[in-house]
Image (cartoon, helix red, strand yellow):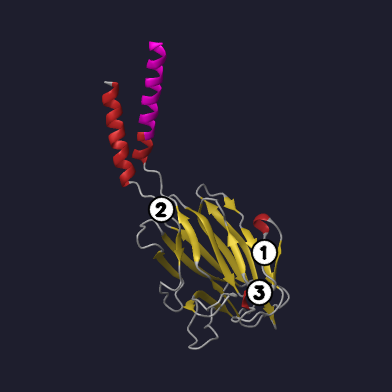
């Protein structure tokens, strides 16, 4: 009877393991997807072979913050995918480019939310933001940078700055401000990069806000780019698979008990 139960458990277990999806690392590569100029919300399947690699990017203009066209020809309305920033890389790649002309840096900003479709969340999330710098008259600022865990807990990022921007604060209060003018392209373009990472934390979404500082209450045109987004979607544990683990555990306990009785 026990052997028969074990065989049934192992058979079902093997079947479930074959059916259970195991995901690997995925990348939302802006060179491989489309974004209608000026649209504020788009969803993608980052890995065509992985059905749980869905990712959604939503852009919100706060307090009437005016989104404007990218300054480079052919001047598409932003958000748009464009070869606008080089980020110090050997070649200029596509990034999600967003431009604003704020009337009031104290009240207006842009919020970007990135969410993952897998109900199991995502880990190893990281990406770069290009051209967080300062000039005349504007000073870029990233703030309210955090992720949301599956249980709703807020998670602080690990932020890496560059020569022409600086990190202020710690934990959930971290922000980044630009400190010097940086070219959009060319060998020095990487001096305004900001890298955001959430490491091994399991998250459902992340958010950051872009705007200006009090140094320029009515700043000039500002723009920035979001680079490729790296993440690993995590499959939700199948309830049947959990039941099977429980079944095998129970069988193991029974087997152990009988072994002790025989001794």
Tell which tag, 1 or 2, sits nearer the viewer: 2
Q: What is the crowding at mark 2: few (fewer than 14 residues within 10 Å), some, or many (at least 20)? A: some
Q: Pick whichever of labels 1 and 2 is earlier in the sequence.
A: 2
Q: CA distance from mark 1 to mark 3?
A: 17 Å
75 displayed left or right of 135: left
User: How many numbered tags mark residues here?
Assistant: 3
Q: Which residue sits at x=35%, y=57%?
A: 51
Q: CA distance from mark 1 to mark 2?
A: 32 Å
Tell which tag, 1 or 3, sits nearer the viewer: 3
Expressed as whole percent of the image width and height from the top left, the position of residue 22 reads 39, 50
On-image quarter of the N terminus: top left
CB-based contact (under 8 Å), mark 2 and mark 3: no
Q: CA distance from mark 2 to mark 3?
A: 34 Å
CB-based contact (under 8 Å), mark 1 and mark 3: no
The residue closer to the viewer here, 111 or 176, is: 176
11 displayed left or right of 153: left
Circle 1 is placed at which residue position?
175
Magenta residue span: 245-263
Q: Secondary structure at mark 1?
A: strand
Q: Pick whichever of labels 2 and 3 is earlier in the sequence.
A: 2
Q: Identify the residue at the far right of this view.
A: 215
Expressed as whole percent of the image width and height from the top left, the position of residue 143 reads 64, 65
Q: What is the crowding at mark 1: few (fewer than 14 residues within 10 Å), some, or many (at least 20)? A: many
248 displayed left or right of 100: left
Q: Pick whichever of labels 1 and 3 is earlier in the sequence.
A: 1
Circle 2 is placed at which residue position?
23
The residue closer to the viewer here, 202 or 249, is: 249
179 displayed left or right of 258: right
Quick check: is 248 in the magenta stretch?
yes
CB-based contact (under 8 Å), mark 1 and mark 2: no
Circle 3 is placed at which residue position?
191
């Amino acid at each position: 009877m026990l052997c028969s139960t074990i065989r049934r458990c192992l058979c079902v277990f093997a079947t479930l393991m074959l059916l259970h999806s195991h995901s690997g690392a995925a990348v939302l590569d802006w060179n491989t997807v489309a974004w209608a100029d000026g649209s504020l919300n788009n969803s993608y399947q980052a890995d065509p072979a992985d059905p749980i690699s869905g990712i959604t990017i939503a852009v919100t203009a706060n307090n009437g913050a005016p989104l404007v066209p990218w300054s480079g020809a052919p001047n598409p309305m932003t958000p748009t995918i464009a070869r606008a920033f080089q980020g110090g890389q050997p070649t200029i790649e596509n990034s999600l480019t967003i431009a604003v002309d704020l009337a009031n840096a104290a009240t207006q900003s842009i919020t970007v939310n990135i969410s993952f479709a897998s109900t199991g969340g995502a880990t190893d999330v990281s990406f770069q933001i290009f051209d967080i710098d300062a000039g005349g008259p504007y000073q870029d600022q990233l703030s309210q940078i955090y992720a949301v865990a599956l249980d709703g807990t807020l998670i602080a990022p690990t932020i890496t700055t560059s020569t022409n921007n600086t990190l202020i604060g710690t934990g959930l209060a971290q922000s980044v401000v630009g400190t010097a003018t940086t070219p959009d392209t060319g060998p020095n373009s990487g001096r305004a990069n900001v890298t955001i990472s959430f490491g091994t934390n399991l998250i459902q979404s992340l958010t950051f806000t872009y705007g200006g500082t009090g140094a320029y209450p009515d700043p000039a045109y500002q723009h920035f780019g979001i680079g490729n987004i790296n993440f690993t979607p995590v499959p939700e544990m199948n309830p049947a698979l959990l039941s099977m683990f429980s079944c095998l555990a129970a069988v193991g306990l029974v087997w152990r008990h009988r072994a002790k009785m025989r001794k």
